[in-house]
Image: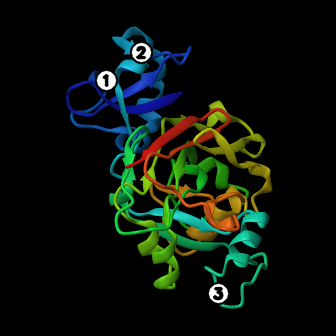
């Protein structure tokens, strides 16, 4: 099932995308008053079967006629993110000098974790505002959506805690990231976390390692990699985070970006006004955003 949060001239509503992908069924009447996708995920055992059985009976509108918002417009807390989780990206980041003065190209031996502020989230098709940065960069990322929360989750049980997946563009202010010698501030500007277009249940995806990620800028391919190339895979990331921190339903884990970011070119190819970034992942659709 593909869930969306959409607006058609009214308050945000929850929709289920039709089997052919051309329409969206408005399922808001099946949900508790004011419920969003985050609430649906939290009550999935009850609401999932209901949506599966009845959504096709409800009013539908062409998908192209509605404004899609981020599937989870207001996450309950910061988005978990992973740095340098593809080997070639770890190397290009190390060579850039934005990492450490030593320009280390070493592969991390443990996941490098940071977060993005919830206020950075924006939807597919929304404009990305550079803000005060002059070194705006893109990072296409497969993102895990937690279903059943928990603490001390083992690798073996990790996938049973995954509700589904979406796409995030981990937009980054490289100069701020470098100058402040940490990642949170340079990753958390408003509009710097485009998400979507869908929240897709895990049963639609099957083997997540078989997915492929592609990022283009103005139609030019910049990133391409299979998810199986992750240094630390989805079970390892869930086990690492939950070892001492309780994961919650609806938590988002952006799993890292492949090589090909703007920073990795010589000279760097940062984003400028009017650029269009499109991130496509098998089965998850295409997330497209223009730079203001």
The mark that comes first in sequence, 1 or 3, is: 1
Q: Nearer the viewer, mark 1 or mark 3?
A: 3
Point 55% across, 64% down: residue: 81
Q: Are marks 2 and 3 in contact (CB under 8 Å)?
A: no
89 vs 274: above or below: below
Q: Considering depth in this image, is 50 or 84 the residue closer to the camera?
A: 84
Q: Which mark is residue 54?
A: 2
Q: Are marks 1 and 2 in contact (CB under 8 Å)?
A: yes
- Residue that carries the numbered disc 3 in the rendered image: 100
Spot occupied by residue 201 in the image (x, y as percentages of width and height) = 56, 35
Q: Considering depth in this image, is 243 or 290 the residue closer to the camera?
A: 290
Q: Could you say which quadrant of the image residue 95 lies in?
A: bottom right
Left or right of 160 on screen, residue 194:
left
The mark that comes first in sequence, 2 or 3, is: 2
Left or right of 152 on screen, residue 290:
left
Spot occupied by residue 142 in the image (x, y as percentages of width and height) = 61, 49
94 vs 131: above or below: below
Q: CA distance from mark 1 to mark 2?
A: 9 Å
Secondary structure under badge 3?
loop
Q: CA distance from mark 1 to mark 3?
A: 52 Å
Left or right of 129 on screen, residue 257:
right
Q: Which mark is residue 30?
A: 1
Q: Is residue 249 visible?
A: no
């Amino acid at each position: 099932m593909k869930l969306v949060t959409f607006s058609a001239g009214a308050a945000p509503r929850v929709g289920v995308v039709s089997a052919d992908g051309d329409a969206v069924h408005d399922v808001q009447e099946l949900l508790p008053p004011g419920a969003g996708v985050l609430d649906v995920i939290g009550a999935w055992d009850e609401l999932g079967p209901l949506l599966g059985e009845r959504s096709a009976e409800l009013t539908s509108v062409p998908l192209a006629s509605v404004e899609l918002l981020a599937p989870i417009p207001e996450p309950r807390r910061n988005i978990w993110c992973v740095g340098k989780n593809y080997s070639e990206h770890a190397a290009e980041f190390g060579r850039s000098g934005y990492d450490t003065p030593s320009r280390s190209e070493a592969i991390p031996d443990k996941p490098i974790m940071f977060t993005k502020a919830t206020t950075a989230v924006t939807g597919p098709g929304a404009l990305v505002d550079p803000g005060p940065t002059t070194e705006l960069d893109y990072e296409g990322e497969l993102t895990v959506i937690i279903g059943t929360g928990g603490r001390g989750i083992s690798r073996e049980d990790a996938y049973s805690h995954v509700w589904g997946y979406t796409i995030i563009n981990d937009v980054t202010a490289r100069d701020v990231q470098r100058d402040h010698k940490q990642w949170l501030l340079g990753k958390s500007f408003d509009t710097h976390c485009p998400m979507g277009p869908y929240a897709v249940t895990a049963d639609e995806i099957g083997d997540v390692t078989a997915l492929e990620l592609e990022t283009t800028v103005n139609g030019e391919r910049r990133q391409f990699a299979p998810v199986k190339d992750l240094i630390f895979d989805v079970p390892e990331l869930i086990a690492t985070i939950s070892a001492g921190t309780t994961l919650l339903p609806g938590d988002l884990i952006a799993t890292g970006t492949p090589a090909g970011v703007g920073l990795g070119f010589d000279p760097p190819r940062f984003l400028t006004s009017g650029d269009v970034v499109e991130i496509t992942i098998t089965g998850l659709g295409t997330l497209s955003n223009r730079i203001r």
